[in-house]
Amino acid sequence: MFGLIGHLTSLEHAQLVARDLGYPEYADQGLDFWCMAPPQIVDSITVTSATGQVIHGKYVESCFLPEMLATQRVKSATRKIINAMAHAQKHGIDITALGGFSSIIFENFNLERITRVRDIELDIRRFTTGNTHTAYIICRQIEQASQQLGLDLAKSTVAVCGATGDIGSAVCRWLDARTDIDELLLVARNQTRLQDLQAELGRGKIMALEEALPLADIVVWVASMPKGVEIDPATLKPSCLMIDGGYPKNLATKIQAPGVRVLSGGIVEHSLDIDWKIMNIVNMDTPSRQLFACFAEAMLLEFEQWHLNFSWGRNQITVEKMEQIGRASVKHGFRPLLLPLAAS
Ligand code: NDP
């Protein structure tokens, strides 16, 4: 059985969907109340592969909210993730994806040192960040959506915002090894990590966001921002593709400019309906078929019976592992979300 550990994007979002999640008593409550809420299994899932194979899973709501980080409630945030992992393991789930901020919190606060939660000895091999599949899907979105727009990658400048992160660095490795993009712009805050990535790749220009945006034909947003940034479309190239892979979204507002196209990054579409209700709550356009690529990674590991932490640690995702999970993704009927056909 596979598991998905998820969280909502804000306190406002949590209050809106509390009833659907089975927490009617939380609908009018503030952040402190959510800080005390225990993890809960809120959905049972059945997925049928394009091959006909059927698997079952559970969705674990961790009750983490990004405001917990923004307001320094770090202890609550870390407890949410560890407790959700213990909850998944206690329910006999073989492989669980840590969605959204879950894996970032696990890594940033060094939660590997916590090996025991009450009577549960955490077995890290039962968890995956899902970042290898997410990075693979974002790369396929860059390749396929640029084709939809008639953008020639060989003449394109690609800016990766969050380049030194787990997903961002994997995207940079793929772009370098598997595409012929013209220029790669590396955007993040920590200069040492940027220089290390540049040295590893042997290419890429380090730039601040405001310098990179006017030059980019394609912007890949994979920064871990608890709140999105406001972008003035006048600072962008008149025709450009923005792939927003952040959860919550890195772009705070909908960009309204004729030549600027925004695509939800790291989202896959399954070829068959999935029997679940949870994706209604996170506002997917086609909730029966669309999902986060990290969640799909747990499904793929279950389909293939690879019960191991396929994606783990930081900045270790290789192009070969992206290709491996990519083959499983295609085999079982997942494809990257692309721009709507009528508008392309
Ligand atoms: P990491 O924490 O590994 O990396 C985050 C990157 O963002 C780093 O390069 C960091 O560098 C940079 N960053 C953070 N804040 C800013 C800022 N204000 N301006 C510029 N750069 C910034 O994160 P992941 O790679 O694991 O995840 C990235 C995003 O993808 C997250 O939003 C996550 O929720 C989302 N995600 C989506 C999934 C999906 O299925 N669609 C699956 C998993 C994650 P520095 O700190 O130096 O600035």
Image: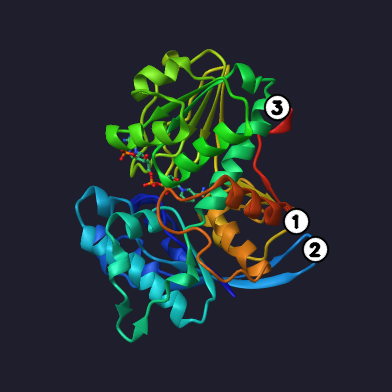
Residue drawn at point x = 62 percent, y = 25 percent: 180
- Give the x, y percent position of residue 137: 60, 44
Q: Earlier in the sequence, mark 1 or mark 3?
A: 3
Question: How far, Cα to Cα, is label 1 from label 3?
Answer: 23 Å
* Residue 131 can be seen in this image: yes
**Mark 2, residues whose alpha carbon is within 10 Å: few (<14), some, or many (≥20)?**
few
Under circle 1, the secondary element is helix
- Give the x, y percent position of residue 102: 39, 58
The answer to which image quadrant residue 49 occupies is: bottom right
* Residue 46 can be seen in this image: no
Q: Earlier in the sequence, mark 1 or mark 2?
A: 2
Q: Nearer the viewer, mark 1 or mark 3?
A: 1
Under circle 2, the secondary element is loop
Of the residues shown, which amino acid type is indicated by label 1?
Answer: Lys
Q: Which mark is residue 148?
A: 3
Residue drawn at point x = 63 percent, y = 23 percent: 153
Q: Which residue is mark 2?
A: 51
> Does mark 2's beta carbon lie closer than 8 Å to ligand 1?
no
Question: How far, Cα to Cα, is label 1 from label 2?
Answer: 7 Å
Q: Earlier in the sequence, mark 2 or mark 3?
A: 2
Of the residues shown, which amino acid type is indicated by label 2?
Answer: Thr
Q: From the viewer's perspective, is 307 left or right of 79? A: right
Question: How far, Cα to Cα, is label 2 from label 3?
Answer: 28 Å
Under circle 3, the secondary element is helix
Q: Quadrant of the C terminus?
A: top right
Q: Which residue is mark 1?
A: 331
Confirm or deny contact between disc 1 and disc 3 (CB under 8 A). Answer: no
Of the residues shown, which amino acid type is indicated by label 3?
Answer: Gln
Q: Is residue 214 above or below residue 33?
A: above
Of 10 and 302, the residue lying toward us: 302
Q: From the viewer's perspective, is 53 left or right of 39? A: right
